[in-house]
Image (tube, rainbow, N blue to C red):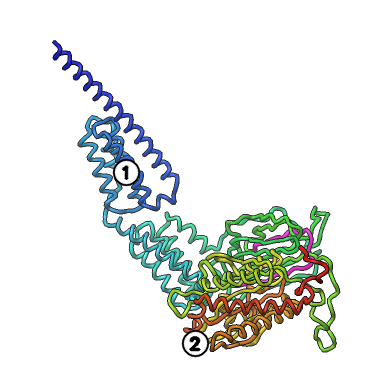
Amino acid sequence: MSKRKTFITILLCCTVSVFWSCASSGSTSKNLFFQAEACRSELRKSPDKQKYRSYWFGCIRKFEAVHQQDPSGPWAAAGLFNMGSLYEELYSHSYKKEDRQKAENIYRQIVKEYPASIYKKRALAAIKNLPKYNHGSDDIASAKKKFFEAEASYTELLSHPNKQKFRSYWMESIKKFESVYRQDPSGPWAAAGLYMMGNLYEDLYKHSFKEKDKQKAKELFEKIVHQYPDSAYSKKAENKLKGDIQSLILSRETEKSNDKAASTKETTVSAEPEKENNSGLTTVTGIRYWSNPDYTRVVIDADRATSFQNNLLKKDPAIDKSHQRLYIDLKNSRLGNIKKTIPINDSLLKAARAGQYTPDTVRVVIDINSFEDYNIFSLPNPFRIVIDVRGQISAKKDIPKKDRNGQDTASIARQLALGVQRIVIDPGHGGKDFGAPGYFKGVHEKKVVLEIAKKLAEKIRQELGCEVILTREGDTYLTLEERTAIANTKRGDLFISIHANASRNKRAFGIETYFLNLTTDDESITVAARENATSKKNISELQTILNDLLQNAKINESSRLATYVQKELCSTLGKKYNRINNKGVKRAPFYVLIGAQMPAILIETSFISNKIECQRLKDAKYQSTLCDGIVSGIRKYIKETQPTAYFGAPADEGPKG
């Protein structure tokens, strides 16, 4: 009897254990299923994640865990079905044969292993509706891959103005997009490839002015319209052919009627000469600004060069315009998908507003609170219009007049006893702009000059007691106009841009220091063209408008600063190194110096293209010695500019600040 009771007890325990195990397993499978479902939901909400197979497989494995947790349980078929569904979705992105096959195999597994499940019917329907696979799917995947490779090549070309001068680089990029089309002429990427070919020929025409390039672009756009009418690129190509734009007319703005009341300060500026481009309009791509209470720089970005006109409108309370307005009309232009109103709200400007003034003119209006003066100029590669607005200078002092020989009776800076308390150091290039390549593989200007700039900043702080601001402290890309804007808005007293020189002649070596001014020296123009990432032709054209931008006081002070720095730099290096070639102080129209409101210089520290000087530029000791020379030059400039301030207060006054 005792044995019988023991047996019954054991049997009951086993039954409860099995029941509890099944219940626990079902509960765990259910939890896993909802976790997997949450993963899929998050994936579907993120187009960026859908580009990577790892995210798809992360969710697939979660549904697989549901099936493996309890293969005979109620959630097993659900887990499998959702695995198949995810593989099917992945196939629509990847076009890989194995993804489609995996989906079909899973659906068939459900039909075979779970005939009583509600998912059998769904699996059969899914198999029936699976997209048919053929060799074209491989073509689609290959065409997609080639498209992104071609797009990378195109982006690379656009970021290198020097390459854009050579037809071979354009044709190389065009052929890559052509291979996208040829890979799968009836596939979804064919029209995209043709459209990008048309874009490239259109851009090439702006450089070559060859009628055949413009005609080729037209033929490609027509081909898209006729052969791919259902493609998303058909409408884009049609717009290219018609030259149509989506007009956004400025809300009832009365600038046009007020042109008669405008001030006389009006200029029309043409960018580098271009033949009329009938295949499209310039697109205004953005508006940027930097400001402080007495200076604001506004930059209008566009995708190609165009002519523009500016005009200053007077206040007109009659039309509820109690402030002045400066407008810039960009001809043959359309407004891109940008923010139309940019609030500025500083002491000088209220806002910048952009609108489609006429079907082929974009008007940018600057609403002004107050100003003393302004300058407008354009820079190429990429094309942008720069507006510098300056406020009234506090505590004005009489500026000395020149004597009858045209020379200053004394240095303006010295007469005004200007202090040097804050120095802005600008390491050239950075980010996607590598600068000049070094003689040795892997050496680039952007890295070398950043190392020099950091050392220079530390030495200036320690030895001169000045505050130092670096325009960049890491591998960051900055536009040339942004660097000057930083110096102005931070109210720098000196601006020093650090660069490394380069030449096709590997034997060229030496050190030179530049300040902003006109020049006829071909070598200086060549250096400026390289640092400006533009052509010598553009530099020559820029010089025709520089007269309006140059201020004699800044030129004179910049020249003196450059002279001190160049002399001390070469002298200091010459004490420790041989073959120090003093190439002297030179003048050139460097974009990075235009608009600087303080003495500004650009130092070409050494030739990175020369074997010996490239090796030196990599060396920390050489960098440090080079910085010693620059600091010595700045010290002498400060001492000569304000001798009393440099030597400090009289002893009986004690320390100040």
Q: Quadrant of residue 31?
A: top left
Amino acid found under the numbered disc labelled 2: Asn
- For label 1, the SS is helix
Q: CA distance from mark 2 to mark 1?
A: 59 Å
Q: Which residues are magenta?
A: 361-379
Dominant SS type (magenta): strand
Can you say which quadrant of the picture contains the C terminus?
Answer: bottom right
Going 68% across and 83% down the picture, which residue do you hit? 563
Which amino acid does the dot numbered 1 rest on? Arg
Please indicate whether residue 179 sits to the left or right of residue 420 in the image. left
- Camera sees residue 411: yes
Residue 259 seen in this snapshot: no
Q: Which mark is residue 505?
A: 2
Looking at the image, residue 475 lies above or below residue 232: below
Q: Earlier along the polypeptide chain: callout 2 or callout 1?
A: 1
Few, some or many C-alpha atoms within 10 Å of disc 2 (few <14, some 14-19, many ≥20)? few
Residue carrying label 1: 61
For the N terminus, the image quarter is top left
**Which quadrant would residue 587 be assigned to in this image?**
bottom right
**Residue 26 in the image: above or below residue 123:** above
362 relative to 136 in the view: left or right: right
Is residue 366 found inside the magenta-colored segment of the image? yes
Q: Nearer the viewer, residue 504 or 445?
A: 445
Q: Nearer the viewer, residue 305 or 55?
A: 55
Please report the residue visible at 61 percent of the width from the left and 85 percent of the height from the top. 570
| Contact (Cβ within 8 Å) of mark 2 with mark 1 | no
Location of residue 604 in the rendering, given as x and y in whole percent from the top left corner: 58, 80
Residue 157, image x, y percentages: 47, 71
